[in-house]
Every structure is written in structure tokens, then in C-alpha cells.
Amino acid sequence: MLPTVYQYLEEMANRTNGRCTADDVAKRAMEPGCNLWITLDAEGETNGAIITKVEQYPRVRMLNMLYMAGESGLMADFDDEFNSAVEEFAKFNHCAGVEFGGRAGWKKYVEPYGFKLQSVAYEKRFA
């Protein structure tokens, strides 16, 4: 699937300010504990990608959304179906919640799902 989403991996890498390349992002997606999520539009065409990792902290486990990129308007598609899938996956992996860092613009899309802005880092803890 990596060739299918390589353009999104390039976009992810471009947002790191030189910290990594698209190949580095692809290698990260293949690491143990990481998962590559592929998003589809209404016609079933690939329109984005997300890389997550189950992070084990000393006292809690969290699902970290490491990288996200996609077509224009993808943020608006952070909808009930995607949010539910991420939460179910996190709970299945015994995570206490979901976390990610991103632009402040994510706030309006993720706040309705219980995420709180934490200095441009978002976190949602499960009850």
C-alpha cells in the first residue's frame, strides 16, 4: 500500500521542516506498534493517510497519531466513522486515550469528539 499513498508520505515529510524524508516516514510506518491508515473518499479512492503508534509511557498507554496528510478538505472528513474507528482501535490496544500534535486548525474538527487543545497538542482520555 505504500506506493498508493507515497504522495501523502511526501506531504507528511514536508511538514517536518527537514526532520525526515518520505522514505523515513515510510520506514516509520513499518515499525512495530505503528499502523498505516488509508482514508478513502465517497467514490472509494484514496484521499489521505495517517500513521499511528501505540505509545507505552511509564504509567499509561496512548494511541499517538504521528503523521496525517491528505487531499484538500480531508480535515472536514474527521467524522463520526473515523473517530469511532480510532477510538475502537485504541481501546482494543488497551490505550487510555488518543493523542496527536498538529496545527491549531484541527481544533474545530476534533473538539466535538472530546479532544482538548494542549499547546497545539491534542489529547482525548477515555472515561
Image (cartoon, rainbow, N blue to C red):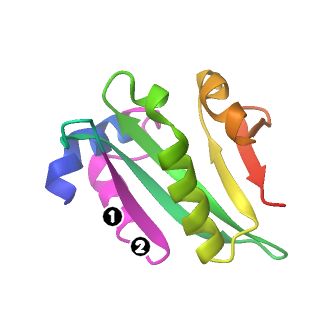
Residue type for callout 2: Glu
Q: Position of residue 19 (x, y in %)?
A: 46, 44
Q: Quadrant of the N terminus?
A: bottom left
Front residue (pair 41, 47): 41
**Residue beneath label 1, please?**
27
**Which residue is at a point 39% across and 22% down the rendered structure image?**
73
Q: Is 126 on the left or on the right of 41, as rendered?
A: right
Q: Please give the range of residues in magenta.
A: 14-39
Q: Which mark is residue 31?
A: 2
Q: Could you tell me how far apart the alpha carbons at marks 1 and 2 are, in whole angstroms?
A: 7 Å
Q: Is residue 2 above or below residue 16?
A: below
Label 1 CA crowd tier, 10 Å (few <14, some 14–19, many 20+): few
Tell me residue 4's x, y (percent). 16, 50
The answer to whether residue 123 is magenta is no
Q: Amino acid at mark 1?
A: Lys
Quadrant of the rendering where the C terminus is positioned: bottom right
15 in the magenta segment: yes
